[in-house]
C-alpha cells in the first residue's frame, strides 16, 4: 500500500540532509501521525514507516549502510524552477520590529513537461442532505456523470454520498464501469441532515485504498450546509490526509455553509474552498476542479522549515493557481504546481529589532518537498533558504513591481478579513470603517459592482442589521477572485478538456 | 513605525500597503499622478452615488467644450489655452483646471492629474499625463505625454470616464 522503499522520501528529505534536518522532519511527521491522535487504524502503518525511516537515518552507521543500498543519485536535474522575490533585499538595523515579504514562484520546467495528463485517484464526497434537493442535486448528478465519461484508463474515481450517514456508492476501482456508475449516480436521493465527518471519513478510506504517488490523490467535498459538533474530527482527518499527501478541496454551494471551517479544512491539506453562489455554476466549478487536478505537475508541495531566530511568519497566502490563505507553521502545505502557470505564494515575515553588527538575517530555511507523478521516483526535494542582507543605513530601494502587484490586491482581501474579525467582536464601527475603505479601493480599481455590494453590507450593519451570509461570502470570495490573473484562459482550457476527452 | 499618509494608521517599517485603508505606503517615482493613496475624505465621493447638482454650463463664448457623456453636461474650455483634467484630492495640493470630482470621476478611474487638453485657434489636442488607468480616444489607447489631435465628436475615456469633445467650427 505504501512501500517504505525510500526512507528519505518518507520523511520528505534530500539525500544529503543533516542530522538536525532529519530530527525535525521526523518530529513534524510523527506529531501528525502518532497513533494516539489517529482515527483510522490504517494510518498507524504510515507512522511505523516514519519511525523505521527515522531509526535508520538518525543512526550514522545504519544510515551509511542504508545509503550504500540506494541507487546512485540521478544527475541533479532541475525538476522545478524556483523564483524568489523579496520586498526588500537589504534591511536596515533599527531598534523596532519590521516587515519583509517574500514571494515564491514554483513552475514546472518548460523543457520537461509531461506529455500526458496526470492520473487521478479522486473521491467525490457529495452532500445529499434535504437542502440539496432539486436543481443543486440534479446539477451535481449530471456533472458527476459528465466527469465519469471523461475519465481516462488508469484514473480512479470513487463516489461517497452523505447526510447523517455515509454511503460509498462507487467504491474505488481501477476498472471503471461507466454504465454502472451512471446508474448509481442517477439513483442518489436527497434527504437528511449534514454531517460532514461521515462523508469525509468514508471518502478518505476510499482514497487510501488506492493511494499512490504516481497519481493525484484528492478528495472533492461538495456541500451546502453546516456541520455541527464533528468539526474537530473532520480536521483530524484533514491532518491525516495531509500527512499522506491527499488533498482536500471544498465546494460550498449557496450561503449556509461554514466558510471558515471549510477553508481551514482544505488549507490543512494545501487545498482550497470555493464559493458557488448559484446551482447553475456547479458544473463549471466542478469541471474546473477536475481539469486542474489532471493538469497537475507536482502535488502535495509542502514547505518544511524552521524560522530564523525570533522571526515570525505573520501571514501566508497562495496567489496561484488557486487562491487561498495558508497555514503559518511548518510544514506548510502549499498545494500543487500546475503544468501551465505557476504555484505562487507570499509570506509576511516579522523581523525583531536587529542588533548592531548584523550582516545577514535568515528568515526561514528548510526544504520544499513534492510528489511529481511523471517522474520515476516521484518524491522530489529542493532546499530553500530565505534571507536578507542587513546594513546600518536604510537603502532606498523601491519594492519590485511584481511584489507590489501581488500585495496591492492581497491588502484588499486582508481588509475584508479585518472587517469580519471586527464584526465577530461586535465592533460595528470598526467593521464599517474597514468595509468603507474596502469599497473606496474597489471603486478606484473599477470593481464597481463588488464595491456597491460592500457598501450595502456596510450600511446594513450600521443600521444594526446583521450582515447577510450571502453578502459576506460574496465579499470574501469576490475580493479573493480579484487576486486571480485577469484572463479567460481557464475557461478555454476547460473546453479543450471536453473536446479532448470524448 | 511609519504613518500612513492617508489615514494616519501606524504600520511597521517595511509594510507596503496600509492595512487599514489600503493606501500604498511606498511612493513610486514613475508618475506624479499615480493613484497611490485613497484618503478618507475621498470616501464621500465613493459613497454618494447620485450625481451632484452642477451649475448649468455657460458655453456661449468658448471655442471648445467637454461633454460628460453620462450626464450630458457641458464644461466650456475658455480663459486659457491649456487645461489640466483630473480630480481634487484631499491631501495633495494638486488643483486640476477641470475638476471632475463632482461627476463621479473617482469611480471612473480618473487620476488626480489625468490629462491635459490644449485648445488653439486651429487645433485641439489631448495628452495623457501617465495616468494610472490610461486615456483612450474613440476606444484606442493613446500614448502618454504625447499630444494627440482631436476632432469634433471624438469620445475621450479617462479610465472608464467618458467625455465627448465639442469643437465649434
Image: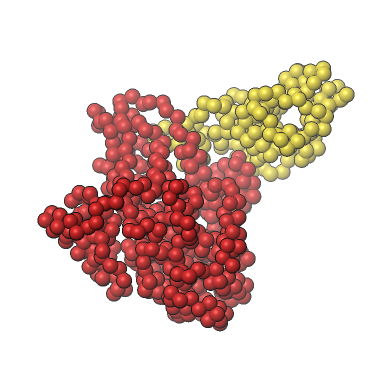
Chain colours: A red, B yellow
Q: Residue at x 57, y 80 (%)?
A: A186
Position in image of residue B33 (x %, y %): 59, 28
- B107 horizontally vs A128: left or right: right
Q: Residue at x 44, y 47 (%)?
A: A111
- A354 horizontally vs B121: left or right: left
Q: Residue at x 81, y 37 (%)?
A: B72
Q: Is residue B12 above or below residue A217?
A: above
Position in image of residue B134 (x %, y %): 65, 33
Position in image of residue A127 (x %, y %): 50, 73
Position in image of residue A203 (x %, y %): 42, 73
Can residue A365 be seen?
yes
In which quadrant is the C terminus of chain A drawn?
Answer: bottom right
Pick whichever, A424 or A102, lies toward us.
A102
Pick whichever, B26 or A280, lies toward us.
A280
Q: Is residue B91 above or below residue A154?
A: above
Give the quadrant of residue B160. top right
Can residue B7 be seen?
no
Give the quadrant of residue A357. top left
Pick whichever, A12 or B19, lies toward us.
A12
In which quadrant is the N terminus of chain A drawn?
Answer: bottom left
- A229 horizontally vs A143: left or right: left
Q: Is residue A18 above or below residue A183?
A: above
- A218 horizontally vs B88: left or right: left
Q: How many marks?
A: 0
Q: Is residue B103 above or below residue A204?
A: above
Q: Residue at x 30, y 25 (%)?
A: A392
Pick whichever, B85 or A496, lies toward us.
A496
Amino acid at each position: 500500500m505504501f512501500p517504505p522503499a525510500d526512507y528519505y522520501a518518507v520523511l520528505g528529505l534530500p539525500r544529503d540532509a543533516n542530522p538536525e534536518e532529519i530530527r525535525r522532519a521526523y518530529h513534524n511527521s510523527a506529531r501528525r501521525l502518532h497513533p494516539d491522535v489517529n482515527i483510522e487504524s490504517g494510518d498507524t502503518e504510515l507512522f511505523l514507516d516514519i519511525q523505521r525511516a527515522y531509526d535508520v537515518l538518525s543512526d550514522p552507521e545504519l544510515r551509511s549502510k542504508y545509503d550504500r543500498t540506494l541507487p546512485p543519485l540521478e544527475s541533479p536535474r532541475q525538476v522545478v524552477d524556483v523564483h524568489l522575490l523579496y520586498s526588500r533585499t537589504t534591511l536596515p538595523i533599527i531598534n523596532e520590529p519590521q516587515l519583509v515579504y517574500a514571494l515564491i514562484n514554483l513552475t514546472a520546467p518548460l523543457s520537461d513537461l509531461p506529455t500526458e495528463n496526470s492520473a487521478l485517484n479522486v473521491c467525490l464526497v457529495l452532500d445529499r442532505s434535504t437542502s440539496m434537493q432539486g436543481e443543486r442535486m440534479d446539477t451535481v448528478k449530471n456533472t458527476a456523470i459528465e466527469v465519469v465519461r471523461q475519465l481516462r484508463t488508469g484514473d480512479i474515481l470513487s463516489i461517497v454520498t452523505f447526510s447523517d450517514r455515509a454511503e460509498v456508492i462507487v467504491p474505488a476501482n481501477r476498472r471503471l464501469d461507466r454504465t454502472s456508475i451512471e446508474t448509481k449516480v442517477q439513483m442518489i436521493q436527497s434527504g437528511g441532515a449534514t454531517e460532514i465527518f461521515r462523508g469525509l471519513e468514508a471518502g478518505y478510506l476510499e482514497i487510501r485504498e488506492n493511494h499512490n504517488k504516481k497519481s493525484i490523490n484528492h478528495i472533492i467535498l461538495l456541500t451546502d450546509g453546516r456541520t455541527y459538533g464533528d468539526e474537530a474530527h473532520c480536521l483530524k482527518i484533514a491532518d491525516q490526509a495531509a500527512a499522506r499527501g491527499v488533498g482536500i478541496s471544498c465546494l460550498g454551494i449557496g450561503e449556509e455553509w461554514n466558510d471558515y471551517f471549510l477553508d481551514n479544512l482544505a488549507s490543512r491539506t494545501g487545498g482550497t474552498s470555493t464559493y458557488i453562489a448559484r446551482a447553475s455554476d456547479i458544473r463549471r466549478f466542478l469541471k474546473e476542479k477536475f481539469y486542474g487536478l489532471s493538469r497537475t505537475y507536482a502535488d502535495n508541495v509542502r514547505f518544511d522549515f524552521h524560522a530564523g531566530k525570533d522571526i515570525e511568519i505573520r501571514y501566508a497566502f497562495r496567489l496561484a493557481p488557486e487562491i487561498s490563505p495558508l497555514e503559518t507553521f511548518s510544514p506548510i502545505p502549499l498545494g500543487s504546481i500546475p503544468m501551465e502557470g505557476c504555484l505562487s505564494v507570499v509570506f509576511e515575515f516579522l523581523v525583531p529589532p536587529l542588533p548592531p553588527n548584523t550582516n545577514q538575517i535568515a528568515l526561514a530555511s528548510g526544504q520544499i518537498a513534492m510528489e511529481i507523478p511523471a517522474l520515476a521516483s516521484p518524491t522530489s526535494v529542493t532546499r530553500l533558504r530565505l534571507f536578507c542582507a542587513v546594513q546600518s543605513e536604510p537603502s532606498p530601494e523601491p519594492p519590485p513591481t511584481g511584489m507590489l502587484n501581488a500585495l496591492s490586491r492581497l491588502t484588499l482581501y486582508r481588509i475584508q478579513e479585518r472587517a469580519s474579525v471586527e464584526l465577530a467582536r461586535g465592533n460595528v464601527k470598526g467593521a464599517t470603517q474597514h468595509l468603507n475603505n474596502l469599497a473606496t479601493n474597489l471603486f478606484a480599481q473599477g470593481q464597481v459592482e463588488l464595491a456597491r455590494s460592500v457598501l450595502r453590507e456596510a450600511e446594513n450593519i450600521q443600521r444594526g442589521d446583521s450582515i447577510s451570509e450571502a453578502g459576506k461570502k460574496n465579499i470574501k470570495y469576490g475580493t479573493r477572485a480579484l487576486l486571480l490573473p485577469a484572463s479567460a484562459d481557464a475557461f478555454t482550457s476547460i473546453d479543450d478538456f471536453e473536446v479532448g476527452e470524448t | 513605525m511609519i504613518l500612513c499618509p492617508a489615514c494616519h494608521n501606524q504600520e511597521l517599517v517595511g509594510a507596503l500597503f496600509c492595512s487599514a485603508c489600503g493606501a500604498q505606503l511606498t511612493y513610486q517615482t514613475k508618475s506624479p499622478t499615480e493613484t497611490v493613496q485613497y484618503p478618507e475624505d475621498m470616501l464621500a465621493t465613493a459613497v454618494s452615488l447620485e450625481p451632484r447638482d452642477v451649475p448649468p454650463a455657460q458655453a456661449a463664448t468658448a471655442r471648445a467644450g467637454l461633454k460628460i457623456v453620462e450626464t450630458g453636461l457641458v464644461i466650456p474650455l475658455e480663459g486659457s489655452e491649456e487645461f489640466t483634467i483630473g480630480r481634487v484630492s484631499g491631501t495633495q495640493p494638486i488643483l486640476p483646471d477641470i475638476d471632475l470630482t463632482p461627476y463621479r470621476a473617482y469611480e471612473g478611474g480618473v487620476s488626480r492629474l489625468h490629462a491635459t487638453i490644449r485648445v488653439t485657434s486651429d487645433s485641439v489636442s489631448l495628452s495623457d499625463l501617465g495616468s494610472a488607468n490610461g486615456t483612450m480616444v474613440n476606444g484606442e489607447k493613446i500614448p502618454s505625454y504625447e499630444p494627440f489631435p482631436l476632432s469634433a465628436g471624438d469620445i475621450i475615456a479617462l479610465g472608464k470616464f467618458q467625455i465627448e469633445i465639442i469643437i465649434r467650427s
